[in-house]
Image (cartoon, rainbow, N blue to C red):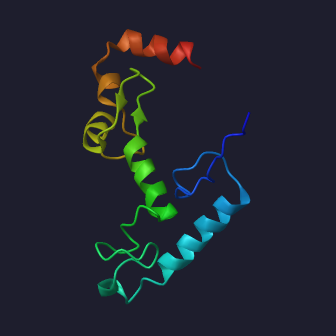
Amino acid sequence: MSKAFCLPDMSGVLYRTGLENRDYDEAIEAMRDAKKQRGKEGFGCTICHDTGHTAEQCHHNPLVMARRAVQSTRTWRCFHCGEVFTDPVKAEEHFGFSRAGSKPKCFNNRPKKRRMNHVRNNA
């Protein structure tokens, strides 16, 4: 019985599973290459060498992909009503424009007695 031949995983560091030394080395190299992009915007990407974009948009750039992941998963949860917001505009409408001292809409719409119970029970 012959043993199956497996090719090494040659996909980009962002698409592989697990974390090995070569993954860190590749990510560091990509970020170093991205730093070289400044002043060379018309010459293509300094990471993957594609001509359709620069390092600031490259899907091989770990920093760009990390920021995209944060933006796509950013959520705000109201501790008073439990509602979850993924849209920053709707979250700001609910929580108020000023973070310091403002109360969310749901808190102001609750009856006063219920608000007091909520504060007392969570103290």
Q: Nearer the viewer, residue 1 or 112?
A: 1
- Placement of the N terminus among the 4 image quadrants: top right
Residue at the bottom extreme of this rendering = 39
63 on left or right of 108:
right
Looking at the image, which residue is at 30% across and 46% down?
Answer: 97
3 on left or right of 48:
right
- Percent of width and height locating residue 79: 45, 26
Looking at the image, which residue is at 29% across and 40% down?
Answer: 87
- Placement of the C terminus among the 4 image quadrants: top right
Q: Quadrant of residue 113?
A: top left
Q: Is residue 119 above or below residue 105?
A: above
Q: Nearer the viewer, residue 8 or 115?
A: 8
Looking at the image, which residue is at 44% across and 49% down?
Answer: 69
Q: Quadrant of residue 107?
A: top left
- Percent of width and height locating residue 12: 52, 58
Q: Nearer the viewer, residue 50 or 86?
A: 50
- Percent of width and height locating residue 54: 35, 75
